[in-house]
Amino acid sequence: MKADVPPPAATSVLLYIALAMLFVLGLGLSAAGADGLANAVGAMQARHWPVKEARLDRCDLSIDVGRHRKYWQISAAWSYGEGLREHYAETWPVDGTPPREPVDAIQVAAVTAQYCHAPGIKLLRISPSRPELAQRNAAVANADAWGFVFPSLLLIAGLFCWFWAGRSVVQEIELKTLERKALSLQRVRNRHR
């Protein structure tokens, strides 16, 4: 046996580790796809909900730093319904890139005023049958059928990873079973000689 070829048991262990990682990847992709599809369905469903004005309790602007860029992000909270007992909060990125130099309080105040005092910021779409469900009106108005495409692709990729990992495990088990049967048959033949 060559020194650079791992023994069959080590190969099986490495295969099972790779298949477990593929299964976990499939689980993550499927979960992300299912979550995205649920959000897209919720936004499309909210198009039929009435638009109502709510009280804007909080509206903050911050800079979020991603892997490759910085972007403005708004966090807002609303109260609505009878006696303002229902609450809704959301965080979303907004257009415009923060300048590269340090951002001062005047720039933050200007962008905050642009978004937090914009007409329509106080509008929510509220479910008539379940008032605890609400969506930001601007998010619902901007939702379209393309919101289903990327989550669907994630879900399909995740299911494919699951299928591939499962199929490979079944093939490996069948191969091991055939090897054991062949070895057992060889032992029986050797005894009868």
Image (cartoon, rainbow, N blue to C red):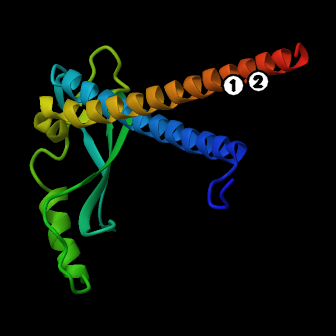
| Residue 110 to residue 154: above or below | below
| Residue 55 to residue 182: above or below | below
Q: Nearer the viewer, residue 180 or 10?
A: 180
- Where residue 51 appears, as percent x and y from the top left, is 16, 28
Q: Nearer the viewer, residue 24 or 2?
A: 2
Task: Specify whether residue 85 is in view.
Answer: no
Name which residue lies at 26% across and 24% down: 41
Instruction: Please indicate whether residue 187 sits to the left or right of residue 27 in the image.
Output: right
Name which residue lies at 15% across and 72% down: 110
Q: Nearer the viewer, residue 150 or 54?
A: 150
| Tag of residue 183 | 2
Q: Nearer the viewer, residue 157 or 182?
A: 182
- Callout 1 touching callout 2 (CB < 8 Å): yes
Which amino acid, by three-letter code, is at mark 1? Glu
Name which residue lies at 33% across and 46% down: 90
Residue count near mark 2 (Cα–Cα under 10 Å), binned few <14, some 14–19, many ≥20:
few
Q: Which residue is mark 1?
A: 179
Task: Specify whether residue 40 is in view.
Answer: yes
Q: Residue furthest bottom?
A: 101
Which amino acid, by three-letter code, is at mark 2? Leu
- Where residue 76 appears, as percent x and y from the top left, is 31, 51
- Where residue 32 appears, as percent x and y from the top left, is 39, 38
Q: Secondary structure at mark 1?
A: helix
| Tag of residue 41 | none
Q: Identify the image quadrant of the C terminus.
A: top right
Q: Hey, which quadrant is residue 94 in on the image?
A: bottom left
- Where residue 86 appears, as percent x and y from the top left, is 38, 32
| Residue 182 to residue 117: above or below | above
Q: Hey, which quadrant is residue 146 in on the image?
A: top left
